[in-house]
Amino acid sequence: MAESAAGRSDLRWHRPLITGLLVGAVLGVLVTAAVGLPRAGRGLTAIARHAMEIALPKWGTTEPVNEIVYGSRGWDTFGETFLLLAAVMATVVLTRGREPRHEYVGESSAGLSEQRQADPAEGANPGETVAREAEKQEEEEAPAPDDTDSDPLGTPAPERAAAMTVVVRVVARAAAPILIVAGIYQAAWGYTPGGGFPAGVVLSGVVILLYAGLGHRAVRRVVRPSLLEPIEMFGAALLIAVGLVGLIRKHSFLDNWLPLAPQQTIRSGGTLQLNSLAELIEVATGITVAIFAMLSIKHEWAPDSDDNDDNDDPGSRT
């Protein structure tokens, strides 16, 4: 008992000590970085001067960060985009059911054929069948989620409401258009910090916000594999096409081949804007596809063959 009490006492002091050391080290790094920032009257560093010398004459943009992301390091961004595409494809493959899919969320037919095989209507477990029929009848008799906004104040909410409270629904509706405009602005204006990658994350976040606040009916017309997956492929193909045209016309992949527009205009940046647009399309649809594919995972009714073999083997029970 004495040894265990001493161990707990050491652990009680050990964790705060390590936490304090880590916090102090991070704080020291941040203070050192803040002190070393260049002052207003100080000249540009060599890398910053190099970026401005490339951004202005070659791309016609005053935003060197976007030039580095989509210009000087365009290959890096190209690889990140298709790494995201590969992750989305892997997620879709791992979450795809054994039956044809019609929508990401709310698939009423998910696993229906396998359920009939493993649990027929006249099978050995009629109680489960009766329970499922009762649950289905309860879902049919429940009020539609779209009626929640038209109910007068003070009306009790339905037991199986798909939407959240009126405060959350109002805030979601008010924030969605603001976030959409902000996301498009990030990708459209190349002379301001932003770009297609963060803009795509913002737009996919809008879809998730509406889904969480208003339910699936609010986004079901948009969140469909037949719509999102071709759009995602179009964004990836657009990025490849912009690079190939640069390779043909300028002998350099992803090089600028558009005429330069006046600085700080929506067309400044040449093909940087096209690359940013392709990123916006691919990232927004890709993240949405991945998230709703994971949300649409359904229960596999039919057991695997290995599970059947193990259950049939008396030795496996021991």
Image (spheres, rainbow, N blue to C red):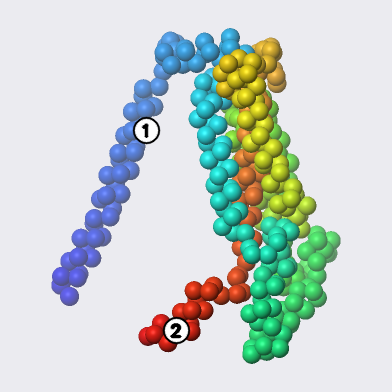
Q: Picture coordinates of residue 209 (x, y %)?
A: 66, 51
Q: Amino acid at mark 2?
A: Asp
Residue 223, percent from left and from top:
72, 52
Gap between marks 2 and 1 measured at Cα: 62 Å
Tell me the amino acid under the disc marked 1.
Leu
Can residue 52 be seen by looking at this rendering?
A: yes
Question: Which residue is at a point 46% across and 79% down the rendered structure image?
Answer: 310
Crowd around label 2: few <14 · some 14–19 · many ≥20 (10 Å)? few
At x 70% / y 60%, what residue is drawn?
101
Q: Quadrant of residue 44?
A: top left
Residue 203 drawn above or below residue 271: below
Residue on which disc 1 sits = 30
Where is mark 2, residue-wise?
A: 313
Identify the residue shown where x is 72% and y is 85%.
121
Secondary structure type for disc 2 = loop
Q: In the displayed image of the protein, which residue is found farthest to the left?
A: 2
Find residue 289 and report its horizontal and vertical position in percent. Answer: 64, 50
Local secondary structure at mark 1: helix
Q: Quadrant of the N terminus?
A: bottom left
Which quadrant of the view contains residue 268? top right
Relative side of 305 to 220, left or right? left
37 relative to 308, above or below: above
Circle nearer the N terminus (2, 1): 1
87 vs 16, left or right, is right
> For the point 66% across and 78% down, which residue is it?
117
| Quadrant that contains the C terminus | bottom left
Horizontal and vertical percent position of residue 86: 55, 44
Q: Do the residues bearing badges 2 and 1 touch, measured as CB atoms within 8 Å? A: no
